[in-house]
Image (cartoon, helix red, strand yellow):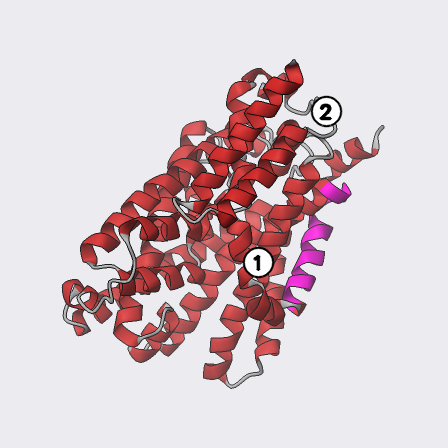
């Protein structure tokens, strides 16, 4: 028996194999998991920038058009995950090669552990102001809780999402409506806009806000019982989830001068609900990010996912404040670098569908697909250094062109 076969049988999270039908989930568990993924405080900062740079019409158009693009990208990846039952890393093995997939796994793991650490610091810093507790103590407590739920895999994330999603939605909407009323209505709030953002830029900000995290969509939708469930829950979650976060941030930014619903609710005298929403908001997304990191490291090291989650949780917690202060620039860089990974996986899936049939699901044709590697490099360069257009879309188009061109040359 090979070492990989032993790992497969020991890993209940299916890090090394397709998820069987008996382990698949229905609509509501998938909906709450995906919606919880998109509920993240960092998106509120983007919403505040949009609210301060666009009028009401521009804001609505930006989140609608950007949401359609983001929903389409994640919806297709969601379908691929459900259809194949494979995680992002196993899909990358087929399109990048068995060893080439390490590049994709390393990139997604590096990004998600970064967001995990940033999320912990985003909770610990403001919570410490209210509770009078040292931020590092709160960071350790938060890190233990979030790592524990991610350790238990998809079931742990499901339980956290069932509790957190309704709390965030109810309290967030209440706070936004109250703040809007106090500020004289949405028209009055957005009338304060400085108008420094174009609609095209706003759309790019909406897409870029979660396109890197959205690349990991197959890690979760592989558990969907039906492809229809995967597509609907993913599109709705990314569309509604992000839209709510943008709206909370936009209204809050105008009402209090802050870009976080935590401070909005504090200003409204809702201190305890503010702490609950802040913690729940960050927990759901950080949980999914840590789970994705564990799968990525499992692909590289061939160790089971759970030990990798623990290792990532410890590192992310200990480095949380450093990551918060130093990692945002790198995360912005990776936001335009990761979409080529998803684009190449999609391109390979639809041009070689027979390779993804159940009987071929675990077959890998090559060690390194250099077309995919070149595609990542080309897409990343264009996404980060070409000033016009939407960076992530530019990166995906170039990545697919590089991949296609190399495959044609290789055949000759």
Tell whether 189 sits left or right of 4.
Answer: left
Quadrant where the C terminus lies? top right
Mark 2 packing: few (<14 Cα in 10 Å), some, or many (20+)?
A: some
- Residue 208 horizontal/vertical position (percent): 43, 50
Measuring 67% from the left and 39% from the top, which residue is drawn there? 15
Where is residue 2? Give x, y as percent.
Answer: 84, 30
Residue depicted at x 65% and y 60%:
313
Q: In this view of the protein, which residue sits in the foreground, 82 or 206?
A: 206
**What secondary structure do most residues of the magenta stretch adopt?**
helix
Distance from Cα at disc 2 to Cα at disc 1: 31 Å
Mark 2 — residue? Answer: 366
The quarter holding residue 233 reads top left
Could you say where residue 76 lies in the image, as x and y percent from the top left?
Answer: 44, 32
Q: Magenta part of the protein: which range? A: 300-317
> Dot 1: what SS?
helix
- Whether residue 30 can be seen here: no
Q: Secondary structure at mark 2?
A: loop
| Along the viewing direction, whichever of 91 and 178 lies nearer the viewer | 91
Question: Which residue is label 1 attached to?
Answer: 330
Q: Quadrant of the N terminus?
A: top right
Mark nearer the N terminus (2 vs 1): 1
Q: Is residue 130 magenta?
A: no
């Amino acid at each position: 028996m090979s070492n990989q076969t032993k790992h497969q049988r020991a890993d209940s999270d299916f890090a090394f194999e397709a998820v069987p039908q008996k382990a698949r989930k229905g609509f509501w568990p998938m909906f709450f998991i995906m919606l919880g993924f998109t509920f993240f405080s960092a998106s509120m900062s983007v919403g505040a920038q949009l609210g301060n740079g666009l009028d009401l019409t521009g804001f609505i158009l930006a989140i609608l058009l950007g949401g359609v693009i983001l929903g389409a990208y994640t919806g297709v990846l969601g379908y691929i995950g459900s259809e194949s039952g494979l995680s992002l890393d196993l899909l990358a093995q087929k399109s990048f090669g068995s060893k080439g997939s390490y590049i994709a796994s390393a990139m997604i793991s590096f990004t998600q552990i970064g967001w995990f650490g940033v999320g912990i610091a985003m909770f610990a810093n403001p919570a410490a102001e209210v509770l009078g507790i040292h931020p590092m103590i709160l960071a350790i407590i938060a890190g233990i809780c979030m790592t524990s739920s991610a350790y238990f895999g998809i079931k742990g994330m499901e339980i956290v999402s069932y509790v957190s999603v309704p709390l965030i939605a109810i309290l967030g909407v209440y706070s936004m409506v109250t703040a809007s009323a106090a500020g004289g209505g949405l028209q009055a709030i957005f009338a304060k806009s400085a108008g420094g953002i174009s609609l095209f830029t706003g759309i790019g900000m909406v897409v870029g806000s979660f396109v890197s995290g959205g690349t990991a969509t197959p890690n979760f939708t592989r558990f969907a019982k039906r492809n229809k469930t995967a597509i609907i829950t993913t599109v709705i979650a990314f569309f509604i989830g992000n839209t709510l976060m943008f709206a909370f941030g936009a209204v809050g930014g105008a009402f209090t001068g802050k870009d976080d619903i935590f401070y909005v609710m504090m200003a409204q005298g809702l201190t305890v609900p503010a702490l609950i929403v802040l913690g729940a908001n960050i927990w759901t997304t950080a949980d999914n990010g840590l789970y994705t990191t564990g799968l990525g490291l499992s692909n590289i090291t061939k160790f089971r996912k759970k030990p990798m989650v623990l290792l990532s949780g410890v590192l992310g917690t200990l480095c949380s404040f450093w990551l918060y202060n130093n990692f945002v620039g790198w995360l912005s860089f990776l936001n335009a670098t990761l979409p080529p990974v998803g684009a190449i996986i999609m391109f390979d899936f639809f041009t070689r569908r027979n390779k993804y049939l159940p009987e071929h699901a675990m077959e890998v044709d090559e060690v390194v697909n250099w077309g995919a590697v070149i595609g990542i490099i080309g897409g990343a360069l264009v996404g980060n250094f070409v000033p016009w257009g939407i960076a992530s879309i530019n990166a995906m188009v170039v990545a697919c062109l590089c991949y296609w061109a190399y495959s044609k040359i290789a055949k000759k």
